[in-house]
Amino acid sequence: MRFGILGPLRVGGGEATVTAGRDRTVLAVLLLRAGRVVPVAELIDAVWEDRPPATARTQLQICVSRLRQRLAAVGLPPEAIVTDPVGYGIRVEPTDLDAEIFARTVEAGRTAVTAGQAAEASRHYRSALALWRGPALSGIASRSVRRRAQTLDEQRLAVLEECVDVELRLRRAADLIDELTETVERHPLRDRLRGQLMLALSAVGRQADALAVYREGRRIYAEELGIEPGAALQELHQRVLAGDLALAGPENPAPAPVRALPRAISDFIGRQQTVSRLVKEIEEDGARIQLIDGMAGSGKTTLAVHLATALGDRYPDAHLFIDLHGHSERTPLNPAAAVATLLRQLGVPAERVPLDLDDRLAVWRSELAGRRALMVLDNAAGADQVAPLLPTGPDCLVLITSRRRLVGLDEGRPSSLPVLDPDEGIDLLGRVAGQERVAAEPQAAAEVVRRCGYLPLAIRLAGARLAHRPRWRVADLAERLVTGAGPLAELAAGQRSVGQAFALSYAQVSPAAQRLFRFLGLHPGVRIDDRVAAALADLPLPETQDLLDELVDAHLAEEAEPGRYRLHDLIREYARLLLAEPDRAEERRDALRRLLDHHLYVAAELTRQVEWASSRLALRLPEPARADLVAAAVADGRSWFDENRSTLPALGRLAEAEGFPRHCWQLARASWRAQFDGGHLDDLIEMHEAGRRAAATMGDDEAVATMLNYLASAYYRLARFSDAIALMETALDLWRRLGLHHEVRNTLGNLATSHTANGDLPQGLACYQAAKAMYQRPGELNHLTHLLNNLAFAHFEAGRYDEALRVSRRHLSLARQVGDARQVAHAIAHLGMIRHRLGHGEPAHRLLRLGLRLKRRAGNRFGEGEVLNEIGLTERRAGRPDAAAALHREALVLMMEAGDRIGQCGSRNLLARALLEQGDVASALDLHRRVLADATRLAARYEQARALDGMARCLRGTDRAQARTYASRALALFRQIESPDQQPTAELLAELG
């Protein structure tokens, strides 16, 4: 260790190496920002603070020069301090700086905690804490240094607290008391430390001392802060008093309590009989699953949250809540997505959530085992959605709400929620509008709630109208409800009372705002931007914005953020019903066409900007009617697709259902690039399946083939290569029948890629050659670049590096010639990967870094992850496994975002190899085993082989027989797919005997 900042400044093993005050300050700032350039202005501020001399820059240069001399004098490289046009920096190796070692060791401790290895975690934590020699950078008075040093001191305390938690679970309370006592004296206002000291004292039978520690803390809080101790410390005090602390129990810690319920409304009224009955069924009859159904707006969620809050103390371990979107404009959550959300609420890290639904449910049930938990499963679509989520143990309470009766659910006690009775309705109106005001007009109040159908949502809306109209009498509102009911006859009977409440607000806005409101109900997304609203209404944007403001004022819309609006489910339904009137059928269809046109043209234009011209032939669109709105949306760039991710599939469903087949398939095609690059494969499949059906109804074989070709890309990314090949072969037959030369050629190229990925390299190369032979005209060079990209990668994976290099160089030349930035990025990245495998170190590194920048600029998550993995491989082979592991972790996140399952397996295999070279054999072996399971499920033979090879390497020193078995299986798989990786595995097998 060459530098120390966890205590007095230390250089080269001594604390007196650098003695000049300014030099010490400069070096301290550089070490606090190790590996980064510190601007000159920041260094000057650290040294001279508010009064820098005119010669500050010159004096700073002198300081740096002296520092370099001091480093050289103690045998350290003076070039460690680097000069940059912006300022200065210091380069340190991973083992040079104590703060860096501290951070890595702490991370190892936290990893051990997550893995349930408490003793190992304690060892890491104590190693990290042993690096400290006192307060960070003590003796340096610079405000800038002290501010950053205090952050380090705070980190030390936080790590000590984590360490103590672990060691308390290891029953080391007696060993901790002296250390905790001393630390609490130095930091008396730190709740967690004081609580840990109380726990340690209680664990050794010194409850009286534990109570004295609490009293002393309470006195200090009162004298210095004027407040009581925190809730957790007060609760701990009560537990000490009650004598129910038992640290001598199981070694594994109790999970931290989870509180994910929404806030219960303060004016909950009524439902007393229902609440009493439900409490009796739960507490006396043991009915742990309650099914609460009722019409929209009847207060199901409000009741469930109120009941959960009231019973929360009986279920202290976890309070969970999830909206299943069963009856909303969003797609209902499937069980896999729902259980993933619930696991996140329980604090399960994303990497521990399996891909497979059954495995995911097993983790869910394991997490609930032993917990006393309650959960609200809100807005369920049906029994099939919630049945997998139900816990198996007797200690959990489940409250399920739905607009429909869940008759298919075997378990559960059903409760159909009625509307309020008249007295409850008047009480609710008074709480919203003012009790005195309502009590002054009892008959009018009774009429208002009757006109609201005693539905809680409708009453709240009516009460809000009164609250915001202080000059109105309640009778005025009652009269309006009677006389303003023109549209109500159009509403469905089950929604009549909700319609009455909404009609009142609707009647208060101008005819132009009413027209816009009706159109907004057509939009299937959660949020609507002002440009979409302008397209729906076919109005100028400024006029549309004024009308939206009017709707917001009338509470018919909510402005979630500037320019973005949303409608409540029931208000949206009301708007739809208004537009469903027979005499508005033409108005409705025209608005639907404008809605679909807007999204189609925006998506197509954004896609046009990143795809080559001939790929856009399938979208032959005339000029848009509202080019101004399209241009305004296109200006958002790629973020437009992110914002409309859930809206686009919903529009595809709408187009199919409403008889707009051309829009349906063209919108799918226009959305493909963003969905594919973004890893939104479920959306891609849904839209292209709908597009295929729509194209078939039109009898448009060209459109059908287009949908099949792009649908295959999702199955390719999901490693369902056989399905992708089948779809492309069907598309190929259609293209040939239509006589479309370049579509045949492109599909052959895509088939080649799928055959190669499926382990059939000869068939893949045959398709590549067939496609390549069809490139005859200079104008087709852009498609040839695509083919060469895939061909180069096929040679690369087959270990034919010289041929891959030749093809990739031609690929780069053609990509530059046609000006295709995406293909240039692919070519440069592949050249870097190929040259790395050929042993061309520095050129490969430059190409990979350039390729990474280009991939990031293009937003290609898969490509970025692919390059990061290759760079990580170079780092590992250069003897830097720590850097390699960090790169592979970053790549894994990108592969997960891209939805590429085989890419995830590859990233995890590479990460495991880096962990092995870091010396973490157990973690590496566990990760390889998980990859093997996933790769086997995906039939990904290459990743299976890599996982088996890695497992053999993990066991080579401890279980050679098992290592030989794994290596033999890996070698057999590598030979099946003719992988170049078979040679290192063969060498490993020979070594193992």
Image (cartoon, rainbow, N blue to C red):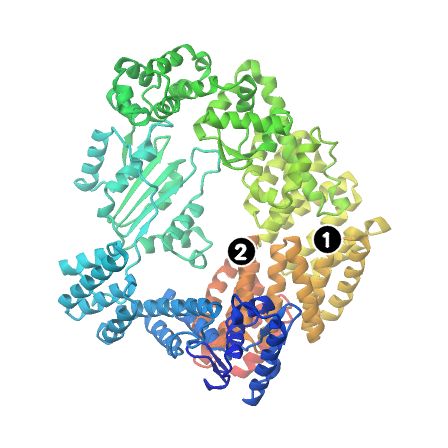
Task: Name the amino acid type tagged 1.
Answer: Gly
Q: Residue lying farthest top? A: 483
Q: Residues within 10 Å of mark 2 (few under 14, many from 20)?
A: many
Question: What number of labels is visible?
Answer: 2
Q: Nearer the viewer, residue 285 or 306?
A: 306
Q: Nearer the viewer, residue 301 or 331?
A: 301
Q: Which residue is mark 1?
A: 749
Q: Circle 2 sits in a helix, a strand or a loop, which is it?
A: helix
| 181 is higher (above) or lower (below) than 653 | below
| Label 2 or label 1, whichever comes before in sequence order | 1
Q: Circle 1 sits in a helix, a strand or a loop, which is it?
A: helix
**Percent position of residue 706, x then y:** 69, 41
Task: Name the amino acid type tagged 2.
Answer: Met
Q: Is residue 243 left or right of residue 18?
A: left
**Percent position of residue 587, x then y:** 60, 19
Q: Is residue 380 left or right of residue 746?
A: left
Q: Residue 926, which numbered label?
A: none
Q: Residue at position x 65%, y 35% from top?
A: 600
Q: Residues within 10 Å of mark 1 (few under 14, many from 20)?
A: many
Q: Which residue is mark 2?
A: 896
The answer to which image quadrant residue 606 occupies is: top right
| 958 is higher (above) or lower (below) than 268 | below
Q: Nearer the viewer, mark 2 or mark 1?
A: 2
| 373 is higher (above) or lower (below) than 30 | above
Q: Residue at position x 26%, y 15% from top?
A: 442
Q: Are marks 2 and 1 in contact (CB under 8 Å)?
A: no
Q: Is residue 740 left or right of residue 953?
A: right
Asked if residue 253 shows in the view, the reply is: no
**Percent position of residue 897, x then y:** 55, 53
**Percent position of residue 474, x then y:** 33, 16
Q: CA distance from mark 2 to mark 1?
A: 26 Å
